[in-house]
């Protein structure tokens, strides 16, 4: 009998063969419970408690006070009129970031996938080049682009050598959000391009041959053959990009730190700042903001499931 047999057989005799799968699932269930489920429950509990104490039993129950504080607002379009103005600045910054990041990411990933699917020279090399940023740590990506965009960085060096003035890319509110969107698209585009490229390669070539016989041009082939058959992959890319954009923190934090001021402050960084980085740590407020973010992600996931099922039923 092997060592594994010595361990498994007594357990199997004790609980029976039919219950043995639970033994193999138990380690993963324990890790999920300790590191995912338990923190979620505790976060929900903290959202209804106040004070600055860390331990749950020392925190007073305040009901929905934290939610009332972050939602109390004279005009939701003007964060200055809100009790928790930084929360609403983060909400609108996140809304702007998600809209432009997702639109840009899907557009450029689709264009790149179409180019890489064509018969071009060194196609394998270019596929590797576009996927390479995905392999880098977000912290490394942030530091590289910070080195390029800072006042005395590479980009300003090139502009000055061409006779232009220096531009404070990371210290100007409009420029900083623009570059945050550009850098996050660059860092994440390779993964989504790969998904779209797999979808393009699964489209039968015979459909294009039949279209060519009927006299369809490249643009007509794209609208009537490529795009409809690629739509399930586009939906997956769209939803994955949206979830990732809502959760964005590390790369933006390294690149701009949420600044200048609060120009690039996103939701996750707001939660981190309020709960852990500020001098007075307001765990309850941070937990209520994270519950709000969790609800948004849940809605996006439900939309994903709805769209995915719709695409599958349409193709069937």
Image: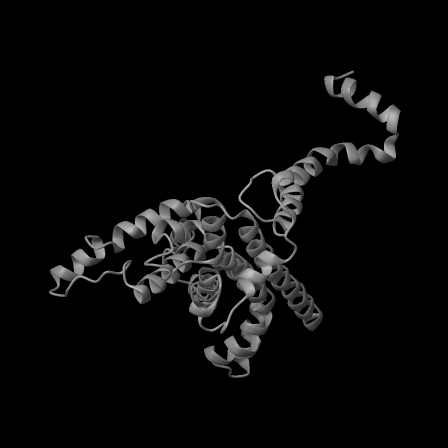
| Left or right: 260 in relation to 245 | left
Q: Residue at x 37, y 57 (%)?
A: 183
Q: Position of residue 76 (x, y in %)?
A: 50, 72
In this image, 155 relative to 241: left or right?
Answer: left
Residue at 49 percent across and 59 percent down: it is 245
86 or 189: nearer the eye? Answer: 86
**Snapshot colouring:** one colour
* Residue found at x 61% / y 51%: 47
Is there any visible trace of residue 103 in the rendered image? no
Q: Position of residue 31 (x, y in %)?
A: 65, 36
Q: Position of residue 132 (x, y in %)?
A: 40, 49
The residue under the point 74% across, 21% down is 4
Quadrant of the rendering where the N terminus is positioned: top right
Residue 282 is situated, as x and y percent measured from the top left of the image, at 51, 48
| Closest to the observer, 59 or 285 | 59
User: In the picture shown, does residue 140 fall above or below 22?
Assistant: below
Residue lying furthest bottom: 215
- Residue 57, relative to residue 46: is it above or below? above
What is the tally of numbered marks visible in this picture? 0
Whether residue 34 can be seen here: yes
- Of 63 and 303, nearer the camera is 63
Q: Quadrant of the C terminus?
A: bottom right
């Amino acid at each position: 009998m092997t060592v594994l047999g010595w361990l498994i057989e007594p357990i199997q005799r004790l609980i029976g063969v039919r219950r043995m799968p639970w033994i193999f699932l138990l380690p993963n269930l324990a890790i999920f419970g300790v590191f995912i489920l338990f923190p979620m429950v505790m976060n929900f509990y903290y959202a209804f408690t106040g004070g600055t104490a860390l331990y749950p039993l020392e925190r007073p129950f305040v009901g929905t006070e934290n939610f009332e504080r972050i939602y109390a607002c004279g005009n939701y379009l003007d964060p200055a009129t809100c009790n928790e103005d930084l929360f609403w600045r983060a909400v609108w910054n996140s809304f702007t970031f998600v809209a432009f990041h997702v639109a840009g990411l899907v557009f450029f990933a689709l264009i790149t996938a179409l180019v890489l699917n064509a018969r071009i020279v060194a196609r394998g090399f270019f596929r590797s080049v576009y996927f390479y940023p995905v392999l880098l740590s977000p912290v490394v990506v942030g530091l590289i682009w910070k080195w390029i965009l800072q006042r005395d960085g590479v980009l300003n060096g090139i502009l000055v050598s061409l006779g232009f003035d220096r531009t404070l890319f990371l210290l100007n509110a409009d420029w900083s959000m623009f570059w945050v969107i550009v850098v996050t698209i660059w860092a994440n585009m390779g993964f989504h391009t790969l998904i779209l490229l797999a979808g393009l390669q699964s489209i039968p070539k015979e459909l294009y041959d039949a279209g060519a016989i009927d006299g369809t041009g490249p643009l007509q082939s794209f609208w009537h053959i490529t795009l409809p058959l690629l739509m399930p992959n586009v939906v997956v890319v769209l939803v994955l990009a949206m979830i990732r954009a809502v959760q964005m923190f590390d790369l933006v934090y390294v690149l701009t730190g949420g600044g200048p001021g609060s120009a690039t402050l996103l939701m996750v960084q707001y939660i981190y700042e309020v709960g852990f980085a500020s001098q007075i740590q307001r765990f309850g407020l941070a937990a209520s903001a994270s519950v709000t973010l969790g609800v948004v992600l849940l809605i996006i996931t439900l939309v994903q499931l709805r769209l995915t099922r719709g695409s599958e039923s349409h193709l069937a």
